[in-house]
Image: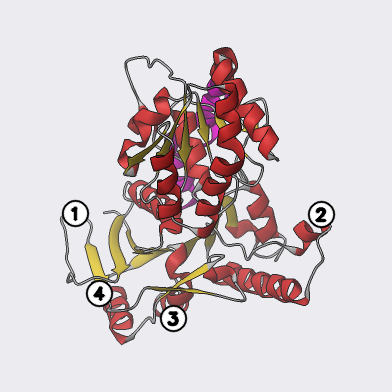
Amino acid sequence: MRERMLFLSAKNHQTQDLEGDIRTGRFLKILQEKYEIDHLFYRNSSRELSVTGGSQFIAYKERGALTSRRTKLRSLYKLRDYAYRSSTGKNMRDNLTDLCRSNTYSHVFISHSLLQNCIDIIRHLLPEATIITDAYRFKGGMSIGEAVGKRILITPYQKLNAALVRRDERNLLNKTGLLLATSEWDALSFKSLSFADASKVHVVPHFIDMHQYEYTEPVLKENSIVLYWDMNTSPGKQVALLFFHKIYSRIKAKVPDVRCYIVCREVPPEVAELGKEDNSINITGPLDNAAEYIRKAKAVIAPLLDNCGARMSVLESWALRTPVVSSTKGSEGLNCEHNRNILLASTAKDAVDNIVSLLQDSGLGGLIADRAHQTLLKHYEANSVRAKILSLV
């Protein structure tokens, strides 16, 4: 008989956390191969608890529990610009208590969005269980090291914020049994906090299932580019407007017949208005349509700033064999190199030059896309990551 695992996750209602929700869902799918899982899914909705066949699926609701608010000092648990917090009221505590008393759990997975609320409760209820946490997006803004490297004035606020982040990271590392980092850089950052706890940290990068991207028929590339990121955030909207005001017109001047597709769940009114003014700009609507547009495009423009779902945009484009233009910040944490498997732009002129090169030189695009696809299969494909996850837990 397989061991039981308690899996705690939440539906975040802010679109900038879509990437984290997808990552959590993929962890769940893999862990179900090894464990009988009771999944406590925490959300703010009117539906009652429900249990489905196989492993238990308990949809827990608490009115007004999931909220977002801006934070001045952004600690490890507060997910950069927004805090997805719940009150962890009496009902949720009682539900967790009933589950833990009714079942024997050897492992508990707590998604990033519930760590602040649940880790101490679980440690109290299940002191012998191994707690698994995902370090996705645990970063409190620009670090002191980054500020020094960029010669930016370090303010007292930045120093205090950095100190609070490191304190929270150290506490998390001490409380968890296994911490999954998204990149080698993040893993080293955690390991440096405590030599005694360094062995708990392992790298599990963002990954995708290639079965979702398999096509039998070859595709004919069109003279088009795709903007593929979450624009329903302040950084996402900012990058989109910057692209159209500073970059797209210069691209059209060199490639007049280019078409631009905006693939996004929700497009801000300011960006949608641009599509009305220029008939070469097309807004596709739901993300379900992304694959076909990406396959046919000669370039995908991934976000140049963080907090826009950048990594998944890059990986999906690699899976569909379409070259990506991004920035060092937008591709942070991925195994990529300029002119090898991606084109990186640090200025508007760089972005224009890179995109025009891909539109005019199909050989260049094909070469970069092939190398990117190989990188994906080696480092970010679900089958290669699955074995590591199952060996760790």
Q: Tell me the element at label 2.
A: helix
Q: Determine whether, in the image, residue 40 is placed left or right of residue 148.
A: left
Q: Earlier in the sequence, mark 1 or mark 3?
A: 1
Nearer to us of marks 2 and 4 is 2
Position of residue 390 measured from the top left corner of the image (x, y, whole percent): 43, 46
Mark 1 crowdedness (10 Å alpha carbons): few <14, some 14-19, many ≥20: few
Magenta: main secondary structure: helix
Position of residue 114 measured from the top left corner of the image (x, y, whole percent): 43, 69
Q: Residue under circle 2? A: 149
Determine the image quadrant of residue 247: top right
Q: Nearer the viewer, residue 5 or 92?
A: 92
Mark 4 crowdedness (10 Å alpha carbons): few <14, some 14-19, many ≥20: few
Separation of marks 3 and 4 at Cα, in angstroms: 15 Å
Image height check: is 297 above or below 325? above
Determine the image quadrant of residue 345: top right
Position of residue 375 measured from the top left corner of the image (x, y, whole percent): 56, 29
* Residue 385 inside the magenta-drawn segment: yes
Image height check: is 155 above or below 216? below
Question: Magenta region: which residues?
Answer: 368-393
What residue is at 67 percent from the left and 50 percent from the top? 185
Nearer to us of marks 2 and 3 is 2
Q: Residue under circle 4? A: 102
Separation of marks 2 and 3 at Cα, in angstroms: 42 Å
Q: Residue under circle 3? A: 124
Q: Nearer the viewer, residue 2 or 229?
A: 229
Q: Earlier in the sequence, mark 1 or mark 4?
A: 1
Nearer to us of marks 1 and 4 is 1
Q: Determine whether, in the image, residue 12 is placed left or right of residue 46.
A: right
Residues under numbered marks 1 and 3 in contact, where contact means CB atoms less than 8 Å apart: no
Separation of marks 1 and 3 at Cα, in angstroms: 28 Å
At label 3, the amino acid type is His
Q: Residue under circle 1? A: 54
